[in-house]
């Protein structure tokens, strides 16, 4: 009896050690702060304007046609065919829609499904920082250890974020299972160049490493910048998982339709994880996705130009308020330096900004392993109507007074 009492006093924590290694999403928390204070939300990357009428009609038509039950677990055939077709059109990559495509609940699920499918305890995953906040936690949840390589900001606003070749090489060893590459990049707006991608390719081949690429912003490019898929490079087709989705290109972040394209053996593993993780993405929205991927090339040109206008609308307002801006070449975010404002750190500044100024942003520290590395940076999203950006600019102008 004494033994039973002794055991009952040893309280179990009921929590995985993994969850102590990361926080909840700071980006989503800043949206909640924006709602609490009635601030203009330039924090979370979702558009506040309408999605294309064609794809909304396609979704309605699918529902009206009773496409309301489970699709094939790894994705509706129409959508998988469209994904394969588009990979060929835009990147010259031949994809088998039956064996190499897995449709997931957004690119976020595609990423965690991929990491769970390929990583073992003791593996390491190389991640460029600043990084989209999911990548570190996803690596931890998959049992791997993230290793970070810094992207350093340009000395001038018009320059490029860059990494040190020797630092990147030093991150690769016999434990490296994968590198996560996000291009165009969130939060920096960096678009990796062909020489940079070829360097990464060479390391992947030398160390027998998988490249997992997040290409969700592939069509949002500025200033003549070119998006290059890692899988299109010689030697990388069989060691690349390409992740993408509908959210950013078609302004439907809430639809949660994404995908992973990978060689058959890796795809089989991803499909197993995906099946037991979420079963499948929304069936009628997958049919709408097939319609979206059939839009003409003019749609994508107009999309990019619309975001260029928004970028060039917001940056002068930020600079006029006292921010140093790092001009993005892709995606729809602007990273800024806040040194001029005299705050001790980015978190206290963003709290002041949302509560007292009325604009929500994301503290730069949330994109780094060590918060001190982002303590002078703040990210703004410009995927908003011009009226929204004007409202934010009017509020931000108070900083310069």
Image (cartoon, helix red, strand yellow):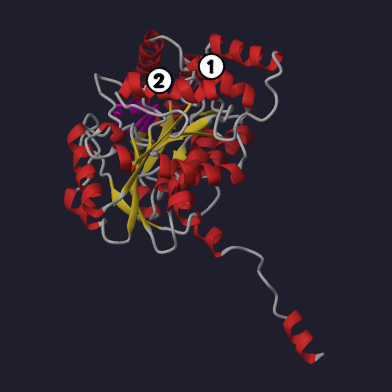
Q: Residue furthest right?
A: 1
* Residue hosting label 2: 85
| Quadrant, the C terminus | top left
Q: Position of residue 319 (x, y in %)?
A: 33, 27
| Quadrant, the N terminus | bottom right
Residue 352 showing in the rendered view: no
Q: Position of residue 138 (x, y in %)?
A: 48, 50
Mark 2 or 1: in front is 2
Say which element carries label 2. helix
Q: Is residue 55 positioned above or below 170 on the image?
A: above
Number of dots carrying numbers: 2
- Which residue lies at the image location 54% right of the left edge and 9% below the top edge? 54
Q: Is residue 108 positioned above or below 23 on the image?
A: above
- Which residue lies at the image location 29% right of the left edge and 23% below the top edge? 92
Residue 330 image-quadrant placement: top left
Q: Position of residue 91 (x, y in %)?
A: 30, 24
Asked whether 373 or 89 is in front, the reply is: 89
Q: Which mark is residue 139?
A: none
- The span picked out in magenta is 318-334
How far is disc 2 from disc 1 in space, using C-alphas?
A: 28 Å
Residue 326 in the figure: left or right of residue 289: left
Say which element carries label 1. loop
Q: Is residue 327 positioned above or below 2 on the image?
A: above
- Which residue lies at the image location 45% right of the left edge and 28% below the top edge? 97
Q: Residues within 10 Å of mark 1 (few under 14, many from 20)?
A: few
* Residue hosting label 1: 49
Q: Are marks 2 and 1 in contact (CB under 8 Å)?
A: no
**Magenta segment: does it hold 332?**
yes
**Magenta segment: does it hold 218?**
no
Residue 5 showing in the rendered view: yes
């Amino acid at each position: 009896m004494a033994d039973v009492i002794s055991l009952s006093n040893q309280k179990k924590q009921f929590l995985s050690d993994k969850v102590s290694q990361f926080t909840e999403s700071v980006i989503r928390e800043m949206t909640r702060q924006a709602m609490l204070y009635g601030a203009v939300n330039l924090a979370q990357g979702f558009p506040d304007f309408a999605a294309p009428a064609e794809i909304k009609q396609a979704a309605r038509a699918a529902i009206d046609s009773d496409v309301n039950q489970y699709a094939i677990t790894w994705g509706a055939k129409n959508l998988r065919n469209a994904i394969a077709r588009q990979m060929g059109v835009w990147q010259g990559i031949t994809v088998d829609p039956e064996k190499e495509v897995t449709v997931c609940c957004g690119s976020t699920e595609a990423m965690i499904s991929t990491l769970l499918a390929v990583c073992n305890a003791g593996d390491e995953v190389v991640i460029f920082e600043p990084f989209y906040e999911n990548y570190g936690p996803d690596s931890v949840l998959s049992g791997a250890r993230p290793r970070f390589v810094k992207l350093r900001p340009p000395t001038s606003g018009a320059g490029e974020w860059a990494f040190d070749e020797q630092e990147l090489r030093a991150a690769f060893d016999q434990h490296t299972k994968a590198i996560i590459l996000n291009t165009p990049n969130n939060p920096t707006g960096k678009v990796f160049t062909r020489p940079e991608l070829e360097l990464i390719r060479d390391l992947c081949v030398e160390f027998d490493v998988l490249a997992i690429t997040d290409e969700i912003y592939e069509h949002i490019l500025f200033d003549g910048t070119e998006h290059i898929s890692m899988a299109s490079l010689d030697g990388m087709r069989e060691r690349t998982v390409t992740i993408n989705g509908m959210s950013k290109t078609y302004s439907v972040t809430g639809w949660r339709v994404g995908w992973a394209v990978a060689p058959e053996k890796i795809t089989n593993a991803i499909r197993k994880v995906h099946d037991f993780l979420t079963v499948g993405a929304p069936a009628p929205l997958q049919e709408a996705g097939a319609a979206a991927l059939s839009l003409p090339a003019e749609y994508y040109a107009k999309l990019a130009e619309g975001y260029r206008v928004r970028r060039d609308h917001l940056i002068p307002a930020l600079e006029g308020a006292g921010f140093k801006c790092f001009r993005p070449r892709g995606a729809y975010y602007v990273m800024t330096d806040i040194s001029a404002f005299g705050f001790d750190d980015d978190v206290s500044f963003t709290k002041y900004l949302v509560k007292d100024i009325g604009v929500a942003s994301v503290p730069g520290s949330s994109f780094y392993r060590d918060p001190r590395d982002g303590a002078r940076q703040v990210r703004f999203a410009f995927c908003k109507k011009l009226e929204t950006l004007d409202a934010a600019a009017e509020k931000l102008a108070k900083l310069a007074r």
